[in-house]
Image (cartoon, rainbow, N blue to C red):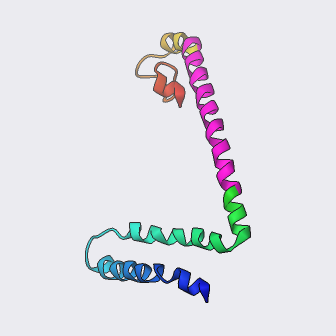
């Protein structure tokens, strides 16, 4: 019974948001996707009571922090290879192709070289 009392302050808010969504969703052009995205937060509420789910969320959070550093390193490598490619291949593209015959992906400017 302590779980019911602990969750009671949240229940009227959830009901109120659901009623707003029902009334505004069909009558007006009001975008209710923001209200629907609040339903995702139920998973985190479940994680408080379910220890296995809490462990999984902790593991995912630690993995994401490691991926941020890996993404930064990948971005630096792609940037360096783009600059190297522009230095190596730009003279070949500019002498071999005219402006009308230029392929879609080329090394004449940084944006195309980066992609």
Q: In which quarter of the image is residue 51?
A: bottom right
In the displayed structure, 75 sits above or below 108; it is below
Q: Quadrant of residue 79?
A: top right
90 and 69: which one is in front?
69
In the displayed structure, 61 sits above or below 43; it is above
Q: Which percent across, then down, holds residue 3?
A: 60, 83
Does the magenta run of residues contain 26? no
Quadrant assignment for the N terminus: bottom right
Question: Is the stretch drawn in magenta largely helix, strand or loop?
Answer: helix
Residue occupying image coordinates x 46% and y 80%: 9
In the displayed structure, 36 sits above or below 2; it is above
Residue occupying image coordinates x 31% and y 79%: 26
Q: Quadrant of residue 28?
A: bottom left
Q: How many marks?
A: 0
Relative to residue 41, is residue 73 drawn left or right?
A: right
Relative to residue 15, is residue 95 drawn left or right?
A: right
Q: Which percent across, then down, holds residue 6?
A: 55, 80
Residue occupying image coordinates x 47% and y 78%: 10
Q: Give the range drawn in magenta.
A: 59-88
Q: Which percent across, then down, holds residue 101?
A: 45, 22
106 and 57: which one is in front?
57
Does the magenta run of residues contain 77? yes
Residue occupying image coordinates x 63% and y 32%: 74
The residue positioned farthest toward the bottom in the image shown: 1
7 and 14: which one is in front?
7
């Amino acid at each position: 019974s302590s779980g019911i009392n602990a969750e009671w302050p949240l229940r009227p808010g959830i009901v109120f948001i659901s009623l707003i969504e029902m009334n505004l969703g069909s009558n007006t052009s009001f975008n209710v996707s923001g209200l629907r995205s609040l339903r995702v937060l139920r998973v985190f509420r479940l994680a408080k009571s379910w220890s296995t789910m809490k462990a999984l969320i902790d593991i995912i959070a630690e993995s994401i922090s490691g991926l941020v550093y890996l993404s930064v390193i990948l971005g630096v490598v792609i940037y360096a290879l783009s600059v190297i490619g522009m230095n190596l291949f730009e003279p070949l593209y500019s002498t071999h192709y005219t402006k009308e015959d230029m392929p879609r992906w080329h090394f004449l400017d940084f944006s195309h070289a980066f992609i």
